[in-house]
Image (cartoon, rainbow, N blue to C red):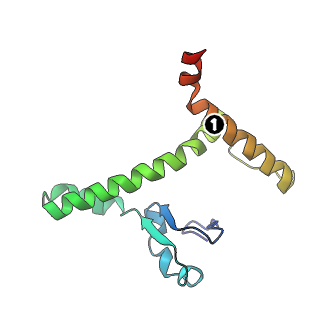
Amino acid sequence: MDPYGRSVTLHGDEECVFGDAGYRGIEKRDEFKHSETEWFIAEPPGKIRAMKKRPKRAEKLNRQIEKSKASIRAKVEHPFRIIKCQFGFTKARYKGLLKNGSKLNLLFALANLFQVRKRLLAQG
């Protein structure tokens, strides 16, 4: 479970995991202590604001690291935003795992097409 009571879904073969500040300390939990996974968890917003106020060279490096973490997370989270906002899929209905899985596969394929729609229209 994550800090909000949601389950953390990992299959076990992950080499690295990126998460927001709500997942701080997850690598210390019993179920993840012995895994080889490398955790890249964002700093809380207050610490990032404090980094911006101090113009030291080390703080600048930390800000760049936080920016790269956020950039990677944004690339992963963007398709979820498309599925929720553009396609209105905010809740999974209890139709069965196979039906929900099929619908999500289709929605992610459509989200990929949605992201490249301008390039596809320019070619045609």
Write the residue at 61% across / 30% down: 114
On screen, residue 106 versus residue 54, left or right, reads: right
Can residue 98 be seen here? The reply is yes
CA neighbours of label 1 inside 10 A, class few (<14), some (14 to 19), many (20+): many
Provide residue 99's location: percent of width, then percent of height. 85, 48
Residue 54: name its quadrant.
Answer: bottom left
The amino acid type found where label 1 is placed reads Ala
Q: Which residue is mark 1?
A: 111
Classify 22 as above or below 95.
below
Is 69 drawn above or below residue 109 in the view shown? below
- Helix or strand or loop: what does disc 1 sit on? helix
Between 82 and 18, which is closer to the camera in this rendering? 18
Which residue is drawn at the image coordinates 71% and 40% (left, top)? Answer: 107
Q: Is residue 112 left or right of residue 56?
A: right
User: Residue placed at 48% from the left, 61% from the top?
Assistant: 18
Q: Quadrant of residue 89 in the image?
A: top right
Q: Quadrant of the C terminus?
A: top right
- Please state the horizontal and vertical placement of residue 22, each as a whole percent of the image: 47, 65
Q: Residue furthest front?
A: 123
- Residue drawn at the location 56% of the way across and 32% of the way down: 115
